[in-house]
């Protein structure tokens, strides 16, 4: 079975594509992952490195995905079959596998955000840190977690099953503006808290000594985070650009998308850290539970914290939903294009399988880390690296030609972009991959081995 002729869908409006890409980019990566990475990696130094990687690595890499998608008008597997020969066509398979792994646990975490929205509205949050931790452990694993994981996945399936124009585009046009408005509102609120000043200086003044001492962990974490937050490295932007019918200016769209994503991540820091400092919680308190334990406990401490917390977690859930649909769309577009299966059937089948793969993550946090680290520090970086090598070194003319469609002659900017992909992007990804693998090995022999021993 190969490509079957189903007319290819397209975005209906100019902003449809931008909204969908922003919706994909802005998600748990910005609101859940970003603050705990900042906390874990020592504050402002991480922020600085992250911003650097967004511009230096994220922007050129995003353009690579865009040109591949728009040129081929195919899903990532089909696209790589078309532009790459021999072994390169299998890179598309890494993308599909990555999508499976990420959405499986992403949905579990998103399920917690729904649970915590309800928790705020129903009972409020517990101010005592130890009790809050206990509550998180109860809610974040086991039957409760599996139930909300299922609920979230069902919502993703429903939107993806409806299609590009009336499903994804319509959904993101409601969700993205809501996320932006609420995030800004919460940051303004956080600025009024007594801990705000101390939080800003922690978040915004880099200490060079901290960066120099910890670069081995800061570099891969910041590079991985840059890729993750921009939805790069697994073909989301290939897929979304493949539904672009027109000659859009991809560089401009990319800059807008990155601008939004980076602003939301940055603003989230302006929300989370003042709240933590006000409640006297150490932001270095690491781990995937950070916003659900420390931040939830901080909400428990604040006046009207139940309401502010519910708005916060509700927003995170919406942001996660608009990202999750892009993760599922990558796999679904492949099934539709290459297998000729209908969209609803594909969405239900794929979503069901992803749900099952996520059950271990809903069962124990260590297993969630096992999936998250593997996808984020290895699969994403590997997929991105291979795509950059293919396009940067073997298809530079095609890439520049496609980027110029809708922009006009780029002059020396074309080669400048290609060289950015060829050297700095590839180098950073390579270093990140090696360090990521070492880090994963440490995790496997450390926390994971301990966990297995305890079972
Ligand atoms: N970017 C999203 C976030 O920050 C997550 C995400 C969606 C993603 N699609 C992706 C990450 C593709 C990597 C690859 O939450």
Image (cartoon, helix red, strand yellow):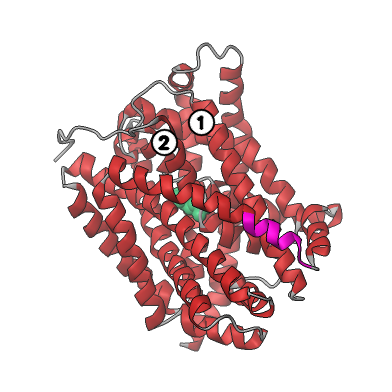
To which residue does mark 2 refer?
A: 17
Magenta stretch contains residue 114: no
- Pointer 1 residue Cβ closer than 8 Å to ligand 1: no
**Main SS, magenta residues:** helix
Residue 60 at x, y percent in the picture? 56, 32
In the picture shown, does residue 94 fall above or below 406? below
Q: State left or right for residue 234 relative to residue 430.
A: left
- The circle drawn on residue 291 is none
Is residue 190 in the magenta section?
A: yes
State the CA–CA distance, disc 1 to disc 2. 9 Å
- For the point 45% across and 51% down, which residue is it? 175
Residue in the foreground of this view, choosing between 316 and 139: 316
Q: Is residue 151 above or below residue 175?
A: below
Q: Which corner quadrant holds the N terminus? A: top left
In this picture, residue 261 sits left or right of residue 394:
right
The answer to whether any part of residue 63 appears in the image is yes
Asked if the residues shown at circle 1 and circle 2 are in contact, with their CB atoms under 8 angstroms apart, the answer is yes
Tell me if 157 is positioned left or right of 247 in this view.
left
Taking the spot 38% from the left edge, 38% from the top edge, the residue there is 240
Residue 217 visible from this viewpoint = no
Ligand 1 is within 8 Å of the C-beta of the residue at disc 2 = no
Q: Is residue 90 above or below residue 139?
A: above
* Secondary structure at numbered mark 2: helix
Name the residue tied to disc 1.
Answer: 253
Point out residue 142 in the picture as x, y percentages from the top left corner: 41, 82
Does residue 401 appear left or right of residue 244 in this picture?
A: right
Q: Quadrant of the C terminus?
A: bottom left
| Front residue of this view, candidates 441 and 207 | 207
Q: On the image, which quarter does residue 75 sit in?
A: top left
- Give the secondary structure at mark 1: helix
- For label 2, the crowd category at 10 Å Cα-Cα, with few meaning under 14, some 14 to 19 and many 20 or more, is many
Residue segment shown in magenta: 185-193
């Amino acid at each position: 079975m190969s490509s079957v002729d189903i007319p290819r869908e397209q975005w209906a409006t100019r902003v449809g594509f931008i909204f969908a890409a922003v919706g994909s980019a802005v998600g748990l990566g910005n609101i859940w992952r970003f603050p705990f990475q900042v906390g874990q990696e020592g504050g402002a130094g991480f922020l600085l490195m992250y911003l650097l990687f967004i511009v230096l690595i994220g922007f050129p890499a995003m353009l690579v995905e865009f040109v591949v998608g728009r040129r081929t008008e195919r899903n990532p597997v089909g696209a790589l079959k078309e532009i790459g020969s021999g072994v390169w066509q299998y890179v598309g398979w890494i993308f599909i596998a990555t999508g499976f792994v990420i959405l499986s646990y992403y949905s579990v975490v998103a399920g917690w955000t729904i649970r915590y929205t309800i928790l705020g509205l129903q009972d409020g949050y517990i101010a005592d840190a130890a009790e809050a931790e206990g509550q998180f452990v109860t809610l974040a694993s086991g039957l409760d977690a599996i139930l909300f994981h299922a609920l979230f996945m069902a919502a993703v399936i429903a939107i993806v099953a409806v299609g590009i124009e009336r499903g994804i585009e319509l959904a993101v046009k409601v969700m993205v503006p809501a996320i932006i408005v609420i995030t800004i509102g919460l940051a303004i609120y956080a600025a009024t808290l007594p801990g705000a000043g101390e939080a800003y200086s922690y978040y915004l003044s880099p200490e060079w000594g901290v960066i120099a001492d910890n670069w081995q962990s800061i570099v891969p974490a910041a590079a991985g985070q840059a890729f993750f937050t921009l939805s790069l490295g697994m073909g989301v932007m290939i897929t979304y650009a493949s539904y672009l019918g027109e000659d859009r200016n991809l560089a401009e769209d990319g800059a807008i998308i990155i601008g939004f994503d980076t602003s939301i991540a940055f603003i989230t820091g302006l929300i989370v850290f003042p709240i933590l400092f006000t409640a006297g919680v150490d932001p270095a308190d690491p781990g995937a539970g950070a916003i659900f334990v420390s931040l939830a406990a901080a909400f428990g401490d604040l006046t009207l914290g139940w309401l502010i917390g519910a708005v916060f977690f509700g927003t995170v859930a919406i942001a996660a939903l608009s990202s999750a649909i892009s993760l599922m769309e990558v796999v679904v577009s492949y099934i539709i294009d290459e297998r000729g299966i209908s969209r609803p059937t594909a969405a239900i089948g794929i979503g069901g399988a992803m749900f099952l793969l996520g059950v271990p993550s809903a069962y124990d946090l260590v297993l969630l880390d096992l999936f998250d680290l593997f996808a984020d520090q290895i699969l994403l970086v590997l997929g991105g690296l291979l795509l950059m090598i293919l396009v940067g070194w073997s298809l530079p003319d095609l890439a520049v030609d496609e980027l110029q469609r809708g922009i006009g002659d780029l002059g020396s900017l074309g080669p400048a972009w290609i060289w950015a992909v060829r050297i700095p992007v590839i180098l950073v990804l390579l270093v990140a991959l090696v360090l990521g693998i070492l880090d994963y090995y440490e995790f496997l022999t450390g926390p994971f081995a301990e966990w297995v021993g305890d079972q």
